[in-house]
Amino acid sequence: MNRDRFPQLEVDLGKLKENLTALRERCQDSFVGVAGVVKGAGAWDSVVRAFDSAGLSYLATSRVDQLRGMREQGVKTPLMYIRIPMRSELADVVSLADASLQSDTDILRATEAEAARQGKTHGVVLMIDLGDLREGFWSAEELVDAAVEVERELPHLHLLGVGVNLSCYGSILPDKRNMQGLVSLAYEVEQAIGRRLEIVSGGSSTSMYMTLNGTMPYRVNNLRLGEIALLGSVYGCSPDFTNKDVFTLRAEVVECRDKPSFPVGQLTVDAFGRAREYEDRGIRRRAIVAMGRLDYGEPCDITPRMAGVEVLGASSDHTILDVEAVKDRIKVGDILEFDVNYASLANLTNTHGVELVTRG
Ligand SMILES: *Cc1c(COP(=O)(O)O)cnc(C)c1O
């Protein structure tokens, strides 16, 4: 009897470690340290173990409960908190993380007070916004002032460096121009505080292509990499040396029969209040797997591995597949495999109904 439970997400630790090692080595060749970002896999303990053994500069995440989980797991790599901290969570941020990204002078002062209270030194990376319009100081002058204040007046904070976030909200591509802007800013801060910064953090997975093609300015010496390690690629950069199948999603077929492809009756809205369009392709074989939006989010974010299987849509708990092209190969009780993307991976690892399975 098959005792596996579904839906099920499997991580292949061997493949993940190969990705991490290959990326760390390429970065090292360019004198770039890696902060490995585990939020995309919900700081799943198996994934964290692989990251922790990969010789990275930091393990990073954007959630305090994930920081706590990693501490409880006993990770050896220093921890970096990469969401701009809320005032209300500073006690946890200071006690759990070795460093955080920061973009507000008041919060820096409050972090200092908390670090003093806990008798700790907390590392900070000041973020500059170079056009993506997510977090970061907008004015370089303001950032330099904040850097000087941290350096001279906030003794329980250690100014590690400066960083930028790109291709997130504003979809701005990391390029020579914004990276050079970051380098100039680092230089300005160094002039103002009279010493060299340890970290100049040039962004996330979407900056990796510059390191790989040799266009990253020499002074950028840190990247915060999540997606490209977990999934082996990121939009615009798919190296030939990474595994793209670290994760496998599996779901069980609970119904498989011929039905019309156009709904019968008066059309209104679907279960989520959305008006939808349907193409009439006649009678087709459809399969339903017991897995839905509550598990992975949006049905467009999972891809069936079997050629000829097409995702038609989903409710909270069911995903409807067109299997006409492979109708002799699928029956009730079968297990179908899917590839995930960053969005579905984050959802699948942050929910209760999905069995997380570790291989290797
Ligand atoms: C999520 C995140 C990253 C990592 O992004 P990837 O696309 O997974 O590499 C880096 N920096 C910050 C601030 C983030 O929030």
Image (spheres, rainbow, N blue to C red):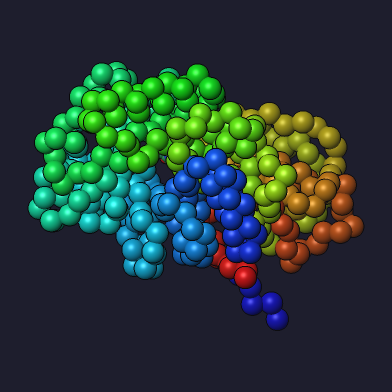
For the C terminus, the image quarter is: bottom right
Is residue 268 in view?
no
For the N terminus, the image quarter is: bottom right
The residue located at (64%, 77%) in the rendering is 3
- Above/below status of 287 relative to 358: above
Q: Is residue 123 left or right of residue 14?
A: left
Where is residue 128 shown, x and y percent of the image?
Answer: 35, 27
Is residue 284 in view?
yes
The residue located at (82%, 59%) in the rendering is 330
Count of labels shown?
0
- Above/below status of 1 relative to 123: below
Q: Nearer the viewer, residue 18 or 186?
A: 186
Q: Is residue 278 left or right of residue 131?
A: right
The residue located at (80%, 32%) in the rendering is 280
Q: Nearer the viewer, residue 255 or 34?
A: 34
Where is residue 214 shown, x and y percent of the image?
Answer: 61, 32
The residue located at (45%, 34%) in the rendering is 220
Where is residue 233 shown, x and y percent of the image?
Answer: 64, 42
Where is residue 300 shown, x and y percent of the image?
Answer: 64, 39
Quarter assignment of residue 175: top right
- Above/below status of 71 relative to 316: below
